Amino acid sequence: MMFNQSGLFFVPKRWQSASFLRWLKRIHAWTGFWGALFFLLLGTSGFLLNHRTDTMKIDTGEPIELPVVELPVAPGTLRDADALGIWARNTLDLPVKGQPPRGQPPGAGRGKERGGGREARFMGKDVAQPEKWVRTFSMPSARVTVEYVVGSSHVTAKREEINFLGVIKNLHKGTGLSVAWILLIDTIAGALVTMALTGFLLWSRMHGTRLLAGGLVFGSLIWALLATVPVMA
């Protein structure tokens, strides 16, 4: 590898030594070694997440729905939707907390939500529907949805299996994962930042055209700006 003699950019002259350069290289190398496999995981999952919308969408497959079961429950046991989530978590021994669904539950799209219950159009008339509570338990490899019609004697539980590509995306998002995983990914993010900073400093000592490097940096920033301005406006 060839080096120039102008020293490292943005580094005080008193640090311009061979030992500092070796120290910088070691930090860059060891942080890369620490996060290498996770960089691959996050890069792959980030690519898939970036193409999850209708624009240039990459279809990773829908969850596989497994048989639905009815779980008996005494009427009046569940006071509200949060109580449903606690009851279902304890009954099914689920590792995560139940959350309200992002959209309407399957089969409920024909009615219009009003307050706790729904109204459906039937034979030209608005018919009041019983109140329904829904909680979803999202895990990396599966999703469990429970539904309860207020006053009934059972809870409907549905499990959906997530395919491999879906699991990779959920790992990226931290869906249903513990604090230990979140902290681990924090260290990987820190490794990426460290590699970026040390890599920039090391580049300033390497042989190459700085004008070209500057063009690459500013070119990517201009590309990002042009791509986001129409959407943000």
Image: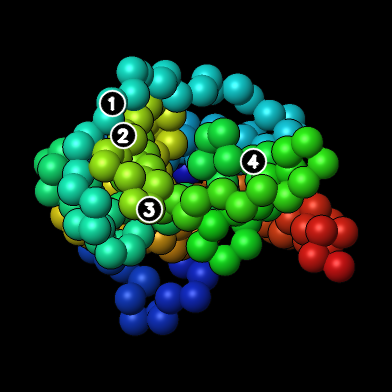
Q: Which of 195 and 4 is in front in this view?
A: 195
Q: Which amino acid does label 4 sit on?
A: Gly
Image check: 172 left or right of 206? left
How many numbered markers are drawn?
4
Q: Residue 69 carries which label?
A: 1
- Marks 3/2 in contact by CB < 8 Å: the verdict is no
Sequence-first tag of 3 and 2: 3
Query: Which residue in the protein does label 2 denote?
Result: 157
Foreground mark, 3 or 4? 3
For residue 109, the mark is 4
Kindly state the secondary structure of the residue where label 4 is placed.
Answer: loop
Kindly identify which numbered label has been placed on residue 9. Answer: none
Callout 4 environment at 10 Å: few (<14), some (14 to 19), or many (20+)?
A: few
Q: Nearer the viewer, mark 3 or mark 2?
A: 3
The kind of secondary structure element at disc 3 is loop
Q: Nearer the viewer, residue 50 or 19?
A: 50
Q: Residue 84: image x %, image y %?
A: 28, 54
Q: Mark 3 points at which residue?
A: 150
Quadrant showing the C terminus = bottom right
x, y (%) of residue 51? 64, 34
Tell me if residue 191 can be seen.
Answer: no
Q: What is the CA distance from the residue labelled 4 to the residue labelled 1?
A: 21 Å
Give the residue type that dot 1 points to: Val
